[in-house]
Image (cartoon, rainbow, N blue to C red):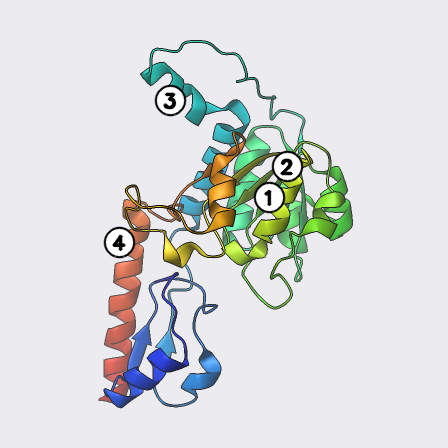
Amino acid sequence: FANDNINKEVIDIMAENGIKLLAMRCAGFNNVSLKDIHNRFKVARVPAYSPHAIAEYTVALILAVNRKIHKAYVRTREGNFSINGLMGFDLNGKTAGIIGTGKIGQILIKILRGFNVKVIAYDLFPNQKAAEELGFDYVSLDDLYAQSDIISLNCPLTKETQYMINRKSMLKMKDGVILVNTGRGMLIDSADLVEALKDKKIGAVALDVYEEEENYFFEDKSTQVIEDDILGRLLSFYNVLLTSHQAYFTKEAVDAITLATLNLLKTLLKVKN
């Protein structure tokens, strides 16, 4: 899956045991050492399963971290009905910067436009037709950082995008910006993010991914000490909302992943025969 580390050691063992196909149940190859596979076996992925699931979850994170819904829930469960510290802002009239305008990004933009949010976007490969149809403008990264009240990362992890959100780029952002990442953890330099939060440069952060998540996500660590100091520090901030890579996790998405994987196997068997 997305957090499995398919490195040279794993690839060697797979090849030695006669594996002919590695079927990834995710869209990205970033955790697979493709150069070590060569022609030893085939690798396939699920290019798209439910972009709606991730786009909708991104909006949920924006609303939650802005209006402090997660904090209000905890308070009222404990009998605390104070609303002190829970003030947010209207999305209406604000500017959202979307980095990555593929299927997920476009659906997210469509939803945000329903809130009367002005949308600007950046993509290495701009889709002008989508921009005209959905009513958003492409801008440079620097302009996106400077103008956005909310920034959402919806791009793949590549050499160009790794740690694109770092100290230098965050200094270009508006004070109090909301930063949301439902893409890949290594899009953000987490150590730099901690410093930006300490400096109160970033208003709030919502993360469904983390650069070292494979050591924690999808497991119950509630009775263990979190040894990752950066993760522990992020969890200590009142204005950080972290979830465990669940943006994709809807019935429709899981069904689509299963069906796509089965169809892939059927296709490969037909080709082989």
Whichever of callouts 3 and 1 sits on the residue coming sooner in the sequence is 3
* Residue on which disc 1 sits: 194
Whichever of callouts 2 and 3 sits on the residue coming sooner in the sequence is 3
- Residue 161 lies left or right of residue 55; in this view the side is right
Residue at position x 67%, y 31% in the image: 176
How far apart are labels 2 and 1 at the CA level?
Answer: 6 Å
Classify 10 Å Cα crowding around label 4: few (below 14), some (14-19), many (20 and above): few
Whichever of callouts 4 and 1 sits on the residue coming sooner in the sequence is 1
The foreground one among 149 and 238 is 238
**Residue 206 at what x, y percent from top left?**
51, 39
Image marks 4 and 2: residues in contact by CB distance under 8 Å? no
* Residue on which disc 3 sits: 74
Whichever of callouts 4 and 2 sits on the residue coming sooner in the sequence is 2
Classify 10 Å Cα crowding around label 1: few (below 14), some (14-19), many (20 and above): some
**Residue 220 at what x, y percent from top left?**
28, 46
How far apart are labels 4 and 2 at the CA level?
Answer: 41 Å
Any part of residue 42 in sight: no
How far apart are labels 4 and 3 at the CA level?
Answer: 32 Å
The foreground one among 132 and 152 is 152
Residue at position x 52%, y 48% in the image: 230
**Residue 215 at what x, y percent from top left?**
38, 57
In front: mark 4 or mark 2? 2
